[in-house]
Image: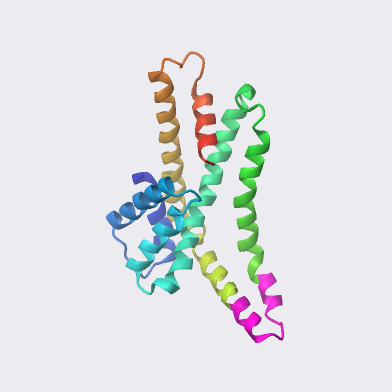
Amino acid sequence: MFLRAVSWQAALRAALPDVRLRWLVVVRATMIGVLVSALIPGRFGEPAKAYLIARRAGDTAKRFPLIIGTVFAQTLINLLALAILAAITIASLALIRGHASALIAAATVPIALVALVVTGPTLLARAKRTHHPHLSRIVRWLSDQIIQLRRGLRVFTQPRLGAAAIAAQLAAWAIQTLAAYAVLYALNLQGQAGLAAAAAILLELSWL
């Protein structure tokens, strides 16, 4: 959790250069987000932790979509981590036999979000031309939210902060994988299941 907080703070610093958020504030929001996700299905912890940081940053309503963008930046790094785990898992095909469709389905959601963020403003710009004033206002609001969300990805345009965010997030995944292997070792299963099995377990649990 501390490493994930380090990664997120790098993304927040890139997106909010005018706001100084204390490290412990980001750590606390990260842990609260994990707790909410553990208690409530549907990954509600992600918007919950973004809301906590938005309150600290001031002008909650305006900052919230921007901070959601920083959470989305972490999601993109998670995709890289999951790709690495999948590569390790595929080396042991017996572990994922029958699970290929689940992995494909799980990857579809974040990929669809990436497509929405990239193409959304262009599509909504065309929709703004509608002659219905109420619909036009809704489209304009959606366009503004997506633009703010995209600004949350600024960490990838700043090499130093981007490298810190990626390194910390991948390190967090590495520790989780080693923790899964430690459980297998404690159960005396290391002879039948090695790091590939630990990667497969973490890959499966990531989508629950």
Residue pictured at 47% horizontal, 61% vertical: 68
Residue pictured at 55% horizontal, 43% vertical: 80
Closer to us: 116 or 158: 116
Q: Position of residue 194 (x, y in %)?
A: 49, 20
Closer to us: 166 or 197: 197
Q: Give residue 114's quadrant in the image.
A: bottom right
Q: Is residue 159 magenta?
A: no
Closer to us: 190 or 13: 190
Q: Position of residue 72 (x, y in %)?
A: 51, 56
Residue pictured at 34% horizontal, 45% vertical: 2
The prevailing secondary structure element of the residues shown in magenta is: helix
Which range is magenta?
Answer: 122-140
Direction from residue 186 to residue 191 in the image, left or right: right
Q: Position of residue 16 (x, y in %)?
A: 40, 67
Above or below, comparing residue 110 to residue 178 in the picture: below
Residue pictured at 71% horizontal, 82% vertical: 129
Above or below, comparing residue 123 to residue 76 in the picture: below
Q: Position of residue 177 (x, y in %)?
A: 45, 32
Closer to us: 8 or 137: 137
Q: Give residue 14's quadrant in the image.
A: bottom left
